[in-house]
Amino acid sequence: MDWLREHPEVRTIRVAAADLNGVARGKRIPARFADKVFTEGTRFPFSVMNLDIWGEDIEESPLVFETGDCDGLLMPTERGFMPMPWLEAPTALLPIWMFHMDGRPYDGDPRQVLARVMDRYKALGLTPVVATELEFFLIDDSGKTLRVPPSPRSGKRRTGGEILSLRALDAFDNYFTALYDACEAMDIPADTAISEAGPGQFEINMMHSNDALKAADDAWLFKMLVKGLARSHGFAASFMAKPYDLWSGNGMHMHFSILDKAGKNIFNDGSDKGSDALRHAVAGCLAALPGSTLIFAPHENSYDRLVPNAHAPTGIGWAYENRTAAVRIPASGPAARRIEHRVAGGDVNPYLMIAAVLGAALIGIEDKMTPNDPIAGNAYEQDLPQLPATWNLAIETFANCDYIKRIFPQELVANFLMTKRQEVHYMAELSDEEQTELYLDTV
């Protein structure tokens, strides 16, 4: 409450939690009632955490009519109040997460699921250190065809990708300046920004954190901020996996290492190759990839990104310093030895994505799994096991994966499957243009 008292200009607050698709679900509350929300929480139906991408109830869900659509209790996360710089009126956001009325964490809440994975690490005296890289497009969606917005500086539209172009960044300098100012105000550790391969495509990296829940919060809040701030600047921003057929899509790469009780990186054995623990973690990530593809590619459009020669992995393999591999060990000093997981699209729920990666790595470490030899050269040209290539196949692989059952609680698995199967059914009724319009803002 101290933050709110220091900002008397704030007249309203938003309380919000991430549903299974990562969409913010919440309420608007007058600031004068914020104290009650902060100390006593608020209530949503459990079913709100399990809506489809349109925001509709899941028709077969027992959370709706079978249980009387009963409420859960939502309490503030450790994050506390923060500003919402993309709104004109001074407004505060209070992130929340869901519990049962008796105080038990609700297993259908994505943030609670990540917390469960972190509890498993803590029980072993281990601490993951996590950083994410988020790609997005700035888009003019005012007409029938998506285009790059005209530069506020020159009025011109750049029709091609400009990798690592300062000119492309400077064309939207006011936007990026406002974005970094907002990240600082929201305690989002945004680091380097670059222009990417697509027209109007950019990537911003987050600084690493030894609190995986905060890293997931940062990614979730960053996506909300990027999209909201873009609209206030007169254009759209989208983390949709593949908004343009002819250009590479948006990814959300994740880097992680693991510290022991003494603060030592267990992936570091002083060599260039890394420790046995690193290879165990790699093996776990690779073994869980088929089943967890639905987490990393949760929407129909996601599979347009996962195609050969499009800067997104399709084969299940790992390598040192090779960006064509699904799992990459970047070049670094031994103390910074880490794993980069490159499969997820920008359209993911960050809580589920980080839980899936860290959960799979922990299985590899616990079971002392051994990966196949690292690949060399172009992964697209090698005879590797393949990720599920379609949404339907990913759904069924997720449903039957023993690794998924070890990472995620039964209720979340059931809810996620019901959600995706309902989305498959109704997505078939939409044209390509209607799908793009839907995904552009929601994911």
Image (tube, rainbow, N blue to C red):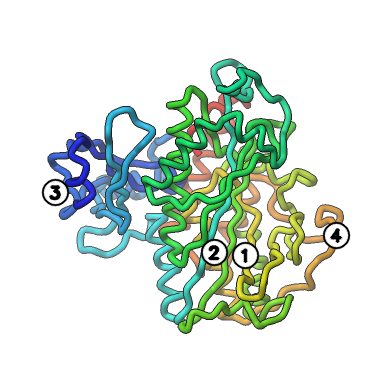
The residue at the point 63 percent across, 26 percent down is: 432
Residue that numbered label 2 is attached to:
404
Label 2 SS? helix
Left or right: residue 225 versus residue 5 is right
Residue that numbered label 4 is attached to:
377
Q: Earlier in the sequence, mark 1 or mark 3?
A: 3
Report the amino acid beneath label 4.
Answer: Gly
Label 4 SS? loop
Q: Is residue 279 above or below residue 188?
A: below
Residue that numbered label 3 is attached to:
36
Task: Tell me, yes or no, if residue 395 can be seen here.
Answer: no
Query: Toward the viewer: 245 or 103?
Result: 245
Residue 324's tag is none
User: Label 3: how many residues lie within 10 Å, few (<14), some (14-19) or many (20+)?
Assistant: few
Residue that numbered label 1 is attached to:
288
CB contact under 8 Å: marks 2 and 3? no
Q: Quadrant of residue 181?
A: top left
Work out how far the residue at label 3 is from the one at label 4, CA to CA, in angstroms.
58 Å
